[in-house]
Image (cartoon, rainbow, N blue to C red):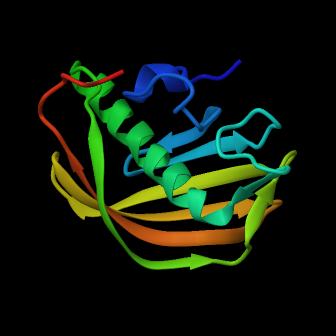
Amino acid sequence: MSQFPRVEELLPHSAPMILVDEVLAHEGSGVRSRVKIREDSLFVKDGRVPAVIAIEYMAQGIGLHAGFEACRKGNPVRVGYLLGTREMNLEVDSFEVGDELEIEVERLFGEEQLGAFRCSVSRAGKQVAAATLSVYQNNNVEGAK
């Protein structure tokens, strides 16, 4: 059993848009999480998920970090928005059903509403995607879930 809250408690999404399966670690400015690609996973076509979807896995990793921060402060989880990405590298064309991906995000700078995160996705211990994402978090809790 995980020592962390369920992903559904940390992200302002509902099924089927929750793509991350579980939190593996949370330390200060970063979160590690896991995604297992299943046949019924969102975005699977012909047994594969396009690698560009890694950006959403990374964004949800950032959402987990924001969810932890909200819980720590006793605040509700809020909606966040991806503003942009820099230096995105995709080392593969796709992920396959059965792949287990580890997502790591680390806050580089920012305040409560605006920030930048270094993000990566690894498969079998090898980095397959990386980017720096800029995000904005709305103060309004409407629209969550």
Q: Is 43 or 55 nearer to us in this picture? A: 43
Determine the image quadrant of residue 93: bottom right
Locate residue 88, reporting x and y percent: 49, 76
20 over 113 or under it: above or below? above
Q: Is residue 135 left or right of residue 142?
A: right
26 over 74 or under it: above or below? below
Residue that lies at the very extreme toward the front in this rendered image: 46
In which quadrant of the rendered image does the N terminus lie? top right
Which residue appears at 44% of the width and 38% of the height?
A: 64
Locate residue 47, reporting x and y percent: 85, 49
Locate residue 129, reporting x and y percent: 62, 70
Which residue appears at 66% of the width and 46% of the height?
A: 43
Locate residue 108, reporting x and y percent: 32, 65
Q: Is residue 135 left or right of residue 145?
A: left
38 over 144 or under it: above or below? below
Q: Is residue 140 left or right of residue 45?
A: left
Which residue appears at 48% of the width and 56% of the height?
A: 105
In which quadrant of the rendered image does the C terminus lie? top left
- Count numbered badges in the picture: 0
Determine the image quadrant of residue 135: bottom left
Which residue appears at 58% of the width and 57% of the height?
A: 53
Residue that lies at the very extreme toward the left in this rendered image: 139
Q: Is residue 128 left or right of residue 32?
A: right
